[in-house]
Image: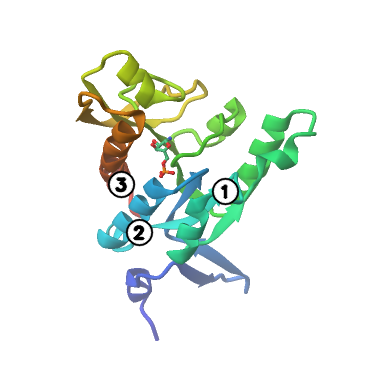
């Protein structure tokens, strides 16, 4: 005989409840995180490593459930597989002949993501502009990291633009995602100096090292503020 309290205390992912009617229902008590990538996946890896190092499963009942890429050759996919994570690809090219390619891609992406019933969807170098329908579907659950001190330098080529403007400081921003590109509530920022003679690559590397700090830290804070089941 196992007491209900003992069952609930077990650190495993699923509980199977036997209902009076004889049916069963799986209740997933974990808060699933789904990470979307398009490239190297270093932010994704930083999130996964933090989740392991800081025991997000034990502390917040949270885990990285899946990594999804819009590019089959994204280096981060292999990295995710090497870390034992479930991965999948939703290739945006497959929808280029649809009547509305962006909406068709986003619908397929949503279907893939929603299999995991995510508590949070984390954009980590995901290089697609998402439709308003996608963004509203994940209201309150969609987070991004952007390599500039927002609201400065929305969009691409952020590091070269900061150098060209003569900025003395650059950085990265973790923010909630809204339908408007690189807008949304700012959750955290990291600041780094722009050094004399910096190239965009040198500045990008300096910023990226700080992204790896603030993104996991922000997600841990969000998870800690979520109600426990
Ligand atoms: C990061 O600088 C991120 O802020 C930007 O794209 C880069 C992705 O790097 N959106 P990685 O794939 O996480 O290594």
Quick one: SS at disc 1? helix
Marks 2 and 1, the one that precedes in the sequence: 2
Instruction: Calculate the distance from the C-alpha at mark 3 to the C-alpha at mark 2.
Output: 15 Å
Contact check, label 3 and label 1, Cβ < 8 Å = no
Residue 94 picture location, percent across and down:
73, 42
Residue appearing at x 43%, y 60% in the figure: 29
Q: Is residue 151 visible?
A: no
Instruction: Calculate the distance from the C-alpha at mark 2 to the C-alpha at mark 1.
Output: 19 Å
Q: Quadrant of the C terminus?
A: bottom left
Quick one: SS at disc 3? helix
Q: Is residue 154 above or below residue 21?
A: above
Q: Quadrant of ligand 1?
A: top left
Q: Nearer the viewer, residue 50 or 56?
A: 50
Marks 3 and 1, the one that precedes in the sequence: 1
Give the number of the disc on residue 131. Answer: none
Residue 87 picture location, percent across and down:
55, 58
Q: Nearer the viewer, residue 170 or 141?
A: 170
Q: Residue 91: which quarter of the image? A: top right
Residue appearing at x 26%, y 30% in the figure: 189
Q: Which residue is mark 1?
A: 113
Give the number of the disc on residue 216. Answer: 3
State yes or no: Cβ of the residue under disc 1 lies below 8 Å from any atom of ligand 1.
Answer: no
State yes or no: Cβ of the residue under disc 2 lies below 8 Å from any atom of ligand 1.
Answer: no
Instruction: Calculate the distance from the C-alpha at mark 3 to the C-alpha at mark 1.
Output: 20 Å
Residue 184 picture location, percent across and down:
40, 24
Q: Nearer the viewer, residue 90 or 19?
A: 90
Q: Residue 221: which quarter of the image? A: top left
Q: Which residue is mark 2?
A: 61
Task: Using a 10 Å C-alpha cutoff, classify the residue at mark 2 as few (fewer than 14 neighbours), some (14 to 19) or many (20 or more).
Answer: some
Quick one: SS at disc 2? loop
Q: Is residue 72 visible?
A: yes
Q: Nearer the viewer, mark 3 or mark 1?
A: 3
């Amino acid at each position: 005989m196992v007491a209900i309290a003992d069952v609930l205390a077990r650190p495993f992912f699923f509980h199977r409840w036997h209902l009076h009617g004889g049916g069963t229902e799986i209740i997933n008590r974990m808060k699933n995180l789904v990470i979307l990538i398009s490239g190297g996946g270093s932010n994704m890896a930083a999130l996964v490593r933090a989740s392991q190092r800081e025991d997000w499963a034990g502390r917040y009942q949270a885990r990285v459930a899946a990594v999804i890429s819009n590019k089959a050759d994204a280096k981060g996919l292999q990295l995710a597989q090497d870390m034992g994570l479930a991965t999948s690809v939703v290739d945006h090219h497959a929808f280029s002949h649809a009547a509305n390619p962006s909406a068709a891609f986003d619908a397929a992406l949503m279907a893939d993501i929603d299999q995991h019933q995510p508590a949070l969807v984390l954009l980590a170098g995901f290089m697609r502009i998402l439709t308003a329908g996608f963004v509203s579907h994940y209201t309150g659950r969609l987070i991004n990291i952007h390599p500039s001190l927002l609201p400065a330098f929305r969009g691409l080529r952020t590091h070269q633009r900061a150098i060209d403007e003569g900025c003395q400081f650059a950085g990265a921003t973790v923010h909630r995602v809204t339908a408007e590109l690189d807008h949304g509530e700012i959750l955290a920022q990291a600041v780094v100096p722009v050094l004399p003679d910096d190239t965009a690559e040198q500045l990008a590397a300096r910023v990226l090292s700080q992204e790896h700090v603030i993104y996991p830290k922000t997600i841990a804070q969000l998870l800690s503020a979520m109600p426990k089941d």
